Image (cartoon, helix red, strand yellow):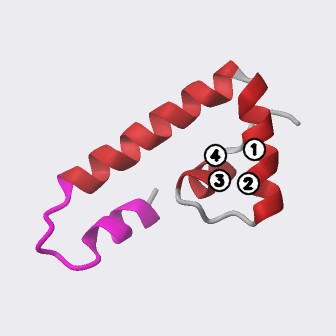
Amino acid sequence: MKHVGEANLQQFVLDELDTESHLAIERHMATCAECRRRLRVERQLDEWLLESVPASVPGAAEQSLARL
């Protein structure tokens, strides 16, 4: 497997992949330091976005993530 693409990486973080794709990425992550680094960054960005959106705005966090 080549490096994980951005779209698949985001879907992996959001747990939106089918089981087969999810497992393939997990196997790749076990051997690819670069993709593990990108995964950490992606998770940090998602966490930062979720923390930066006011909780009082329904759906705002999801809309912010969808724009990425």
Viewer-side label of 1, 4 = 1
User: Considering only vertical position in the picture, is 9 above or below 61?
Assistant: above
Q: Are marks 1 and 2 in contact (CB under 8 Å)?
A: yes
Q: Earlier in the sequence, mark 2 or mark 3?
A: 3
Name the residue beneath numbered marker 3. 7
Q: Secondary structure at mark 2?
A: helix
Q: Earlier in the sequence, mark 1 or mark 3?
A: 3
Q: Are marks 4 and 3 in contact (CB under 8 Å)?
A: yes
Name the residue beneath numbered marker 4. 6
Real-space CA distance between mark 2 and mark 3, rounded to the nearest whole angstrom? 13 Å
Name the residue beneath numbered marker 2. 22
Q: Earlier in the sequence, mark 4 or mark 2?
A: 4
Instruction: Tell me which residue sits at (68%, 52%) in the image.
Output: 8
Instruction: Tell me which residue sits at (58%, 61%) in the image.
Output: 15
Q: Quadrant of residue 58?
A: bottom left
Real-space CA distance between mark 4 and mark 2, rounded to the nearest whole angstrom? 14 Å
- Amino acid type, label 3: Ala
Real-space CA distance between mark 4 and mark 3, rounded to the nearest whole angstrom? 4 Å
Q: Are marks 4 and 2 in contact (CB under 8 Å)?
A: no
